Amino acid sequence: MIARYSRPEMTALWTSEARYERWLAVELAAAEAMAKRGEVPQEDFDALVAKAPKEITAADAARIDEIEKTVKHDVIAFLTFIEERVGPEARWLHLGLTSSDVLDTAFALQLKEAGERILAGVDKALEAIKERAFEHKLTPMMGRSHGIHAEPITFGLKMASWYAELSRVRERLERATKGVSFGMISGAVGTFAHVHPDVEKHVCEKLGLQPDPVTTQVISRDRHAEFFGALGLLGASLERFSVEVRHLQRTEVREAEEPFTAGQKGSSAMPHKRNPILTENMTGLARLLRGDAATSVENVALWHERDISHSSVERVIGPDATILADFMLFRFTRLVAEMRVYPERMQENLEFTGGLIYSQRLLLELARRGIARQTAYVFVQRNAMKFYEEGADFLEALLADEELRKHLSEEEIRGVFDLGYHTQHVDEIFRRVFGAA
C-alpha cells in the first residue's frame, strides 16, 4: 500500500524483514520440537539458536532476494541465507517440512497480529461513536427515506445505529481473526509422513496459533476468505457512515460536517469550498477492501492438494487490506470525534415542510376514530399535497378542511404536531444498544 494510506505500525508488520523473521521463528520452533523428540542433536540445535540472526536486517533481506534471483524459490533462498550464517547445523532446519508449512504458518502470524491491531482500532472508533451518541441523544433531526423527509429522529439515534453495526463488525472480525490463526507443520501433501504431528503441536503452541485439524499441502483458503471478507464488510460499514456525513454536509442540508482545520483549503479554484474529502476518500478505500475480499474468495479453489495461484494474490492483499483497514479506522475515529454538528440547522430542516412530517400520526389518529384507513389517507394526503403544489402550511390546511374537522377538533389536530412523540422511546433504544440510557 502506498504511504499516503498507511500507518507505520501496521506497515512494519509486512516488510520483507518482518516476513523473514517469522519464517525463521517457524523453522527454529520446528527444530526445537525435533530436538525434544531426539530427532535433532541438542548441541546442534543450541548452535542453531546461537548462530541464527536475532533479527533480519534490510541487508539480510537484500541478500535473500539476491539468492532468489538464482534459485527462483523464496524459501530455498531463505534457507540458503541461513546456512551461510549458521553453517553445518543449518541442515536440521526444514527437516521433513515443505515450503507451505513455513509460508502458511508465518502468514497466520501476520494476519493474527494484523487482526488484533485492527480490532483495537475498532474499539477506539466505538468509543468515539458512543461519546457523540450520548452527546446528541436528544438532538432532534430529520429522518429521511429515499432522501426525502420522513419523520423525526435524533442525531444520537443515528450514532447508535453506527455503534450497533460496528459492534457486529467487531464480532465478525474477532471470529475471523481466530479462524485464520491456525498453523501447519504437516509436510508434503499434509500427511505427516516425514514430520511427527507433535512437531506441529509444539510449533503452534510456541507461536500462539492453533494446529489446523487437517491440511492438504496448504491451509484451506476459506479461512483467509473469511478474514478478508470481514475486512470488506468493515469497509462497507465505514463507507455507509461516511456517505451519511457526506449527505449531511451538502450545502442545502448542512446538518453535520467533517472536520475542516485551520489553514485547510477546499478547492484550488473556489476559496469558499469545504469539500467532504475525508469521507469521499473512505468510499474509495472501501472499494479497494471489497475488491480484496472478492479476490480472496477466488483463492479458495486450488488444484488437488495445492497450487500457488493464491500466492501472488496474498502477497498483495495481505498487506494492502490490513494496512487500509487500519488507516480507515484511524481516519474514521478522528472524523467522528471532531465532526461538527449543527442542531439549529437540524431544527430548521425539521420545520421546512411546515409539519408534513406528522402526517402518519394524523393518519393513525383518524383510523383510531373508526375512519377507514384509505379514507383517512385521502384526508391527510390531499392537505399534504397543498404544501408541494401551493406552498400552503400543512396545519392551516388541515384546520380549514371541513370534512376532516368533523372527526378531529382543532386542539386534537394541533396535538398531533408534537416532536416529543417521536423521541419518547430513545432511552429504550439506547439501553438496547449501549446497556444504559
Image (tube, grey):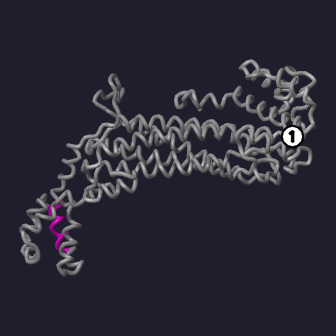
Q: Nearer the viewer, residue 76 or 246?
A: 76
Q: Nearer the viewer, residue 345 or 186?
A: 186
Residue 317: % across, % down: 64, 40
Judge left or right: residue 168 versus residue 308: left
**Relative height, residue 259 to residue 192 (above, below):** above
**Relative height, residue 367 to residue 94 (above, below):** below
Residue 232: % across, % down: 55, 47
For label 1, the residue is: 97
Judge left or right: residue 258 versus residue 236: left
Q: Nearer the viewer, residue 110 or 78?
A: 110
Q: Residues within 10 Å of mark 1 (few under 14, many from 20)?
A: many
Residue 26: % across, % down: 78, 35
**Relative height, residue 290 to residue 267 (above, below):** below
Residue ID at (48%, 49%): 167
Q: In the rendered structure, which amino acid carries the disc numbered 1?
A: Leu
Residue ID at (79%, 53%): 214
Residue ID at (92%, 29%): 91
Magenta-highlighted residues: 378-389
Quadrant of residue 131 within the rendered picture: top left
Quadrant of residue 40 within the rendered picture: top right
The quarter of the image holding the N terminus is top right
User: Secondary structure beneath disc 1?
Assistant: loop
